[in-house]
Image: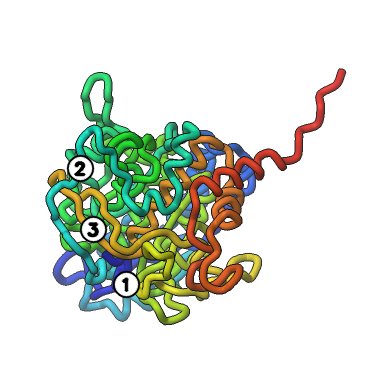
Amino acid sequence: MTSSLVLGRAVSHGPGLRTYIGQLQGAADFHQPGLMPRGGDRKTAVVNELVRVNKNSLERATPGLEALKAKGLVTSYTVNPYSNTVVVDVPDSQAGQAWSALNKVDGMGQIVRNREVHLAPFEQAHAGAAAVQPKADEPKVEWNVSKVNAPAVWAQGFTGQGVTVGIIDTGTDLSHPAVHDKYRGFNKETGAVDNNYNWFDAVNGKTAPYDDNEHGTHVTGTSVGGSPTGYAIGMAPDAKWVTSKILDGNGSGTLETVTKGLEWMLAPRDSAGANPDPTKAPDIVSNSWGTNNGKLTAFENIWKAFVAAGIEPVAAAGNAGPRPSTVGAPGSYPEGISVAATDKDDKIASFSSRGPSPIKGDDGSDRKPDVAAPGVNVTSSVPGGKYATFSGTSMATPAVTGVVALLLSKHKDLTHDEVLKALQTSAVDLGKAGYDYDFGAGRIDAAAALAAADAIVAARPKPPAVTG
């Protein structure tokens, strides 16, 4: 199954309307939050900074927007505070005049049409196949889990415990036995389920987890599904998951729903959509989706906020390979971890998008993808208690997500740079020697990455001794 989101036709909130998304001017300063250890205080500091910047931006832009509203050139607008954007509806009959006027509003930056996004057509084998769980005395570890050496990390006592993974996708089927008990909202002692702060539906507004596609449940399974002693389909089987549904049953959404789903991960809300709480944000966000446009910067401010908040953003490189320069956004962003797909023989998947990225980092680097992981013929959970085998960088991405969860279950205070260094310096070098635009640094190895993380932590400068 591919992960590329194909940008489709422009969409609006109703007949006679045209909907734009405007980026407000104003940049957040994440210096102080970035110095804080991972955890709730740091996440709160980042969200508070985003709110501050948005408030200042709106003070500049609101008079102009209200003036256009009074003239009938704007019918309504809503604010997305954490991405510092506004969603603006204008009369379609006056779209040209409205567009020109919006671009003159003080404090308004780039303006784009709200567009449909679609999961591209996918490859799959045995989709919807009957459950293949072995008997209790015949534990089975799926090949992709073994390939990245995850069981060797479990044997050391690190299985993702204490780590929460955020799944941003088509939803997750809570009833599936491979993932049910891993839901952060499930209380194992009482059997009760609490969806507050653990589930968000940007598409249909439902307040309980579901997946009317298959993609999201498959991704969730590869991240955290199964058991180290039973049928193991996931890399971090003791990590917890929360989900933000951004795509419908057909694998479609809009730039607006994607933005809302990403923002929720920074400050989850209760089931009524109120009382945002950054301390309940996950530790990692897994993005098995991506646009076919590597230059699209619509989500990059949120990626910067994720990293500043100590939330690791992992994203698919895309499935537009084998041509070079095909990595799509957000996998093209310098921030975050971009993932290519390999097969059982450690060959690069033909569909896996290649670098370089069209967006360079502050250091001038265009190196994307960062690492590779198994993504061809991967078996994982799908709705209805079933299992299916899919292919795509969508399947490789949650493998990296799960391995990062393993690292954080031992070293919760790893920085983003340290996580990436641990993954890359320990990766199995494939293709050309050293980094290349097909595999990145190579195919991940969980046990080697944990050893690399141990060494990184041990080499940190020791605090000065306290005297007196």
- In the rendered image, which residue does mark 3 sit on? 389
Q: Earlier in the sequence, mark 3 or mark 1?
A: 1
**Badge 3 density bin: few <14, some 14–19, many ≥20, Cα 10 Å:** many
Q: Residue at x 41, y 40 (%)?
A: 281
Q: Is residue 33 above or below residue 147?
A: above
Q: Residue at x 49, y 48 (%)?
A: 446
What's under tag 2, amino acid-wise?
Answer: Gln
Numbered badge on residue 113: 1
Query: Is residue 72 something one can see in this rendering?
Result: no
Numbered badge on residue 439: none
Marks 3 and 1, Cα distance to the nearest angstrom? 36 Å
| Residues at circles 1 and 2 in contact by the CB criterion of under 8 Å | no
In the rendering, at what x and y percent does residue 369 appear?
Answer: 49, 66
Indicate the secondary structure of the residue bearing disc 2: loop
What's under tag 1, amino acid-wise?
Answer: Arg
Relative depth, front residue between 106 and 287: 287
Q: Residue at x 15, y 53 (%)?
A: 212
Q: Earlier in the sequence, mark 1 or mark 2?
A: 1
- In the rendered image, which residue does mark 2 sit on? 133
Indicate the secondary structure of the residue bearing disc 3: strand
Marks 1 and 2, Cα distance to the nearest angstrom? 46 Å
Marks 3 and 2, Cα distance to the nearest angstrom? 14 Å
Relative depth, front residue between 293 and 314: 314
Q: Is residue 338 left or right of residue 172?
A: right
